[in-house]
Amino acid sequence: MIQLQQIHRIFKVGDQQVHALNDLSLTINGGEYLSIMGPSGSGKSTLLNLIGLLDQPTSGEYTFNNQKVTTLSDDQKAVLRRDQIGFIFQFFHLVPRLTAIENIELPMVLAGIPSTERRTRVSRILDAVGLAERAHHKPEQLSGGQQQRVAIARATIMQPSVLLADEPTGNLDSASGNDVVEILEALNQQGITLIIVTHDAALGARAMREIKMIDGRIIDDGHQKPR
Amino acid sequence: MLIKDLIKLTSCAVIAQRMRSFLTSLGIAIGVAAVVLLTSIGDGMQRFVMAEFTQFGTNLIAINPGKTTTHGASIGIYGTERPLTIDDAAALEKLRDVEAVVPLVQGNAEVESTHRQRRTTVYGISGDMPHAYRVEVALGRYFINEDPSTPRAVAVLGSKLRSELFGSRNPLEQRIRIGGERYRIIGVFAPKGQILGVDLDDAVYIPAARAQEMFNRDSLVEIDLLYRETADVDEVVASIARLLSARHGRDDVTITTQQQMLDVLGSVLAILTFAVAALGSISLLVGSVGIFTIMTIAVNERTSEIGLLRALGGKRQQVMAIFLGEAIILATLGGLLGLVIGVGGAQLLTLLFPALPVHISWNYLIAAETLAIVIGVIAGVWPARRAAKLNPVDALRSE
């Protein structure tokens, strides 16, 4: 469902050109569980942003769900992100002045879904991530693990086909980190494509397909190992 | 995005920064309050002055001798204009749609009662005067049926002159001397008050022909003419001009309608009020700088939030709408606060200085609030556009 062909991404930093992605090709099928690992500056976050349609390749072809997305307009990509892609960040990125419910509702608000439908969807998902009794708390009143679970709820509320997680446990203690990973894996079991970028070798190893990157290239694509 | 959610989202951001939002709104509030207060005073002044001028009614026409136009050559070539006479006034009375004609002679003279003297204004007028000027006779009667060419020596006092000369005693049928001649008092006018500093109550009124004799002149200062309210002003003016041209042999009078005077005065005062409102708007401009500053800061502070919104599928216009909405809410709330302060201040002024004419005009209230909102839009557009243009990857990375 995700096809990258000969992708180059070149940043200009001052006078220098940084080749963040260098002739990268990658195919990801629906329902895969994928980890992307590599040292800092290896281009893994750039790759994730590119897959998430937040960034544009300098050259190359990107096909998402059989749709060429490199030529889409800004608004079309926004709609695709909203409906098909969920983001999970290392630092949660919750809006501090909104309650847990309101944070989870944000994508639906942007999509113009009326509040009655939002309420039923949110209450269902709050049960799924085990935060029903923290629904009206602000982020500052929640623990790190709870905040990340709110973020997961927000990323999945639109029932996307892909979930992109950038160091999802990077800011959590091991127990709550484990909770978060289990929720993500459970979502993958239900059919969502899960792509995790991480430094953490143990977390990376849990994925069914481990990709290692250095200098903007994939050096190891450990295909489909049995679980 | 539903409009309801947009309002909720933006007002939430405004409430989250209570103190900051309040202070920013205060800038707009002071501007709106200044506009409301200044225009209320301006409008009040305008109404006050207009009321002063219309207390004699609005369908008056003044006829003065001479033309107030500039001639190319010396006036001497055309000769001097003929004076207005009592006979002219009598002729004007016969015109269609004319209700009352008041020939006017004016001068100063010594007025003596048996005990007191007072130098005051003497008006020589006709029987139509109370009707034309809307003055009431408080005591006695008025010389309505005097023969204009040979009137008797009768006088009507202004209320102030009456109290000066006679105190509380009844002046009717008393003899007084005006400019050395003996007059009989037949009436007293009700107080009319001042008009632009001229005290009509501190005066004595006698038939015009008598006044002409007293001041040794055979002309009139002015003829005032009251026309029927239903009549067409232009037609009345035209018929007056035709009649006087025929009588004088040429067009040598200046005809001024009350309406013309009021129009000119009204437009001058309206410009004055507008100028005052423009002055108040300067403080609104300062308030708009406040909104601009705060919104620029907000965009900087919430860069990562903007990145998040974009990642969650927010379009550029939606990000723009959210930040522009915040600016508009700040301006609108500030404007409403300013209306409360302005109207409250205007009412306080009326309470403290009852003499000061203050009139709150709805038009200016609505205009001030609209202006505040427009200023919010203008001040908010640039920061909001900046927010919308941010690169989502860079925005997400900033923390």
Image (cartoon, rainbow, N blue to C red):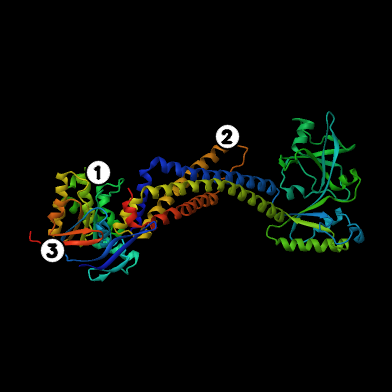
**Circle 2 residues within 10 Å: few <14, some 14–19, many ≥20:** few
Residue A55 in percent (x, y) is at: 31, 61
**Which type of secondary structure does the marked residue at label 2 adopt?**
helix
Report the residue marked by disc 1: A137
Do the residues indicated by labels 1 and 3 lie within the same chain of the protein?
yes
Q: Decide if residue B218 is in sight here.
A: yes
**Extreme residue toward the top, this view:** B115
- Disc 1 and disc 3: Cα gap in Å? 42 Å
Residue at 34%, 53% (x, y): give it: B395
The image's mark for residue A223 is 3
Q: Are marks 2 and 1 in contact (CB under 8 Å)?
A: no
**Extreme residue toward the left, this view:** A226
The image's mark for residue B352 is 2
**Vertically, is B114 above or below A169?**
above
Q: Closer to the observer: label 2 or label 3?
A: 3
Q: Is residue A190 left or right of residue B149?
A: left
Tell me the quadrant of the picture where the N terminus of chain A can be found. bottom left
Residue B79 in percent (x, y) is at: 91, 59
Residue B354 in percent (x, y) is at: 60, 37
Please give the chain letter of the residue carrying mark 1: A
Amino acid beneath label 1: His
